[in-house]
Image: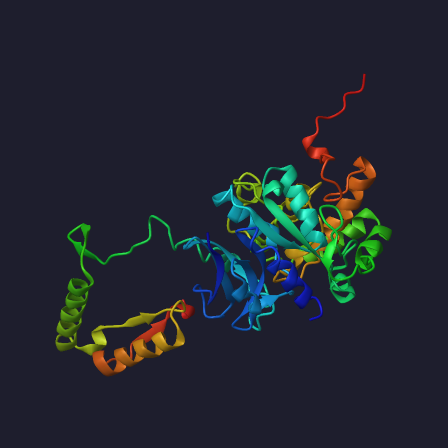
C-alpha cells in the first residue's frame, strides 16, 4: 500500500488542470477502472490489480476527443498507449500520464521485461523493479518446431473460444475482426481449429503486443498467451529491430512499405 | 463527462460470474471481467463478454406485445397483466391447474426463482415448474 498515498497526491495535484483522471477505484470490495473527477472520490483510489486502462482511455476519447484527461500508467500501459497512438486510437496531446512502477512481485507475476514506464514519463510513484525473464519462453526456444507445435496444440485444446484474449487486449480495436469472419473461423466450432484461430490472433499481435498480459489474465483456460506473444515479439525484434512501445517515433514494421531490392 | 463501472452478475446462466458494465455518459458501452472475484476470477465466457449487447439494442422489447391473430400489438403493462391473470384463472378452473406448466430462468435472481415456484405451487396450484438450466 506504500504507493497509494503518493499516487493519490499525484492525482490530486492534477484534478484542477484536467477534466478527469483515469485510475482504479475500489468499491464493494472489488477494483475497477474509474474516471476520477473529484478529490472526494480519492478515498476509494486503488493501485492494483491492474486493468487495461489504455483501452478505457480509447473508449472515452472516442466520445470526448477534446477533453483534457490524465491516466495512471504502468510500464506495459505506457507501451500500449504508444502503440495505440501510432495507430490513431488515442490522442497523447490531450492526456497527461502519471507513471506507476510495478513492484518486484507484480513484475514476477507478469514475467515482465520492463515493469516501469520510461518513454513518455518516468515513474512518479514506486521504484523500478528488475526485469523478469519468461522462463517458459526460454524453455520453448530450446525445443524444435514439432515439439513447440505439439505444446501449443495441447494448450489450445482447452480453449473455450470466449474471445476474452481479444476483448481484453487494448491493442485489439479493429471494427471487423478476422476471428469473426466465417471464411477463417467456423461459427459454433469449439475448441476452434488449431492452429488457425490462435495463430491468426498471434499474427495480428505482431508489432503491437506490449506484453501487458491482459489476454492471459482473462483466459478461463489458463493458456500462457503472454509467452506465445513474447516469442513472437522476439522474432519481430530479430527480424525488424522493432520493439513495440519502446519509442514514439519509430513506425511498426507492418505499417511500413516493404523495401524493394534494386 | 462521466465514466464508471457498475458491478453486477452475468445474466446468462446460473454460474454467477461477476462483471463490470462500463458506463460512459449514462450509456452502457462495454463489459469488463472482475479481477479477483471468487467465482469468475477475472474471466468470462463469450456470453458474459457480450452481456452489455442487448441493453441499448434497437431490437430489444421494451413494451408488452399481445398477439392478435398473426401479428403483435403493443400494450400497456396493466393490460398485459390483466390478460395473463384472466387466462391463467380460466385454465385453473377448466381443464385444471395441471394443464399449466411454468419454466423459470437462470437469468433471474435466486429470489425471483423462489417467487416463481411459490406462485406456481401456491397460486396456480400445480407442481409443474422447471427451469431453463435443464434444457
Residue furthest out toward the right: A142
Using the rendered image of the protein, determine whether residue B40 is visible from the camera's viewpoint: no
Residue furthest out toward the bottom: B122
Residue under the image location 46 percent in, 65 percent down: B10
- Residue closest to the eye, A97 or B33: A97
- Residue closest to the eye, A109 or A219: A109
Residue under the image location 43 percent in, 64 percent down: B11
Specify the quadrant that holds the C terminus of chain A.
Answer: top right
- Residue closest to the eye, A186 or A171: A171
> Is residue A115 shown above or below B92?
above
**Quadrant of residue B38 within the rendered picture:** bottom right
Q: How is the image coloured?
A: rainbow
Specify the quadrant that holds the N terminus of chain A.
Answer: bottom right
Percent x, y of residue B46: 52, 56
Percent x, y of residue A157: 65, 57
Residue under the image location 29 percent in, 76 percent down: B128
**Quadrant of residue A162 within the rendered picture:** bottom right
Residue under the image location 70 percent in, 26 percent down: A257
Percent x, y of residue A89: 58, 41
> Is residue B109 shown above or below B19?
below
Residue A248 placement, left or right of A193: right
Residue A164 placement, left or right of B57: right
Amino acid at each position: 500500500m506504500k504507493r497509494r498515498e503518493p499516487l493519490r497526491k499525484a492525482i490530486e495535484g492534477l484534478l484542477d488542470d484536467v477534466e478527469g483522471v483515469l485510475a482504479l477505484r475500489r468499491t464493494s470490495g472489488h477494483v475497477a477502472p474509474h474516471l476520477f473527477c473529484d478529490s472526494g472520490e480519492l478515498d476509494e483510489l486503488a493501485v492494483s490489480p491492474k486493468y487495461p486502462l489504455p483501452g478505457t482511455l480509447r473508449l472515452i476519447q472516442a466520445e470526448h476527443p477534446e477533453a483534457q484527461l490524465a491516466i495512471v500508467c504502468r510500464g506495459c500501459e505506457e507501451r500500449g498507449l504508444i502503440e495505440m497512438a501510432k495507430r490513431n486510437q488515442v490522442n497523447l496531446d490531450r492526456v497527461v500520464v502519471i507513471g506507476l512502477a510495478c513492484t518486484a512481485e507484480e513484475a514476477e507475476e507478469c514475467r515482465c521485461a520492463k515493469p516501469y514506464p520510461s518513454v513518455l514519463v518516468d515513474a512518479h510513484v514506486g521504484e523500478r523493479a528488475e526485469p523478469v525473464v519468461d522462463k517458459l519462453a526460454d524453455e520453448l526456444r530450446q525445443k524444435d518446431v514439432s515439439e513447440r507445435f505439439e505444446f501449443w496444440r495441447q494448450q489450445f485444446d482447452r480453449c473455450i473460444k470466449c474471445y476474452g484474449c481479444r476483448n481484453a487486449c487494448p491493442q485489439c480495436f479493429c471494427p471487423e475482426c478476422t476471428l469473426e469472419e466465417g471464411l477463417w473461423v467456423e461459427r459454433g466450432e469449439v475448441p476452434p481449429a488449431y492452429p488457425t484461430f490462435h495463430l491468426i490472433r498471434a499474427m495480428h499481435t505482431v508489432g503491437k503486443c506490449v506484453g501487458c498480459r491482459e489476454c492471459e489474465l482473462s483466459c478461463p483456460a489458463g493458456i500462457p498467451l503472454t509467452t506465445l506473444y513474447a516469442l513472437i515479439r522476439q522474432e519481430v525484434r530479430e527480424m525488424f529491430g522493432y520493439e513495440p512501445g519502446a519509442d514514439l517515433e519509430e513506425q511498426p514494421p507492418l505499417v511500413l512499405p516493404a523495401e524493394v531490392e534494386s | 463527462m462521466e465514466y464508471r463501472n457498475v458491478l453486477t452478475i452475468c445474466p446468462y446462466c446460473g454460474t454467477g460470474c461477476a462483471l463490470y458494465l462500463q458506463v460512459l455518459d449514462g450509456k452502457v458501452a462495454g463489459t469488463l471481467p472482475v479481477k479477483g472475484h471468487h467465482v469468475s476470477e477475472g474471466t468470462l465466457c463469450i456470453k458474459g463478454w457480450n452481456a452489455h449487447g442487448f441493453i441499448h439494442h434497437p431490437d430489444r422489447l421494451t413494451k408488452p406485445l399481445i398477439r392478435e391473430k398473426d401479428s403483435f400489438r403493443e400494450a400497456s403493462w396493466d393490460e398485459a397483466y390483466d390478460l395473463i391473470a384472466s387466462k391463467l384463472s380460466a385454465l385453473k378452473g377448466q381443464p385444471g391447474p395441471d394443464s399449466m406448466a411454468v419454466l423459470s430462468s437462470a437469468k433471474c435472481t435466486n429470489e425471483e426463482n423462489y417467487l416463481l415456484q411459490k406462485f406456481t405451487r401456491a397460486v396456480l396450484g400445480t407442481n409443474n415448474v422447471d427451469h431453463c438450466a435443464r434444457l
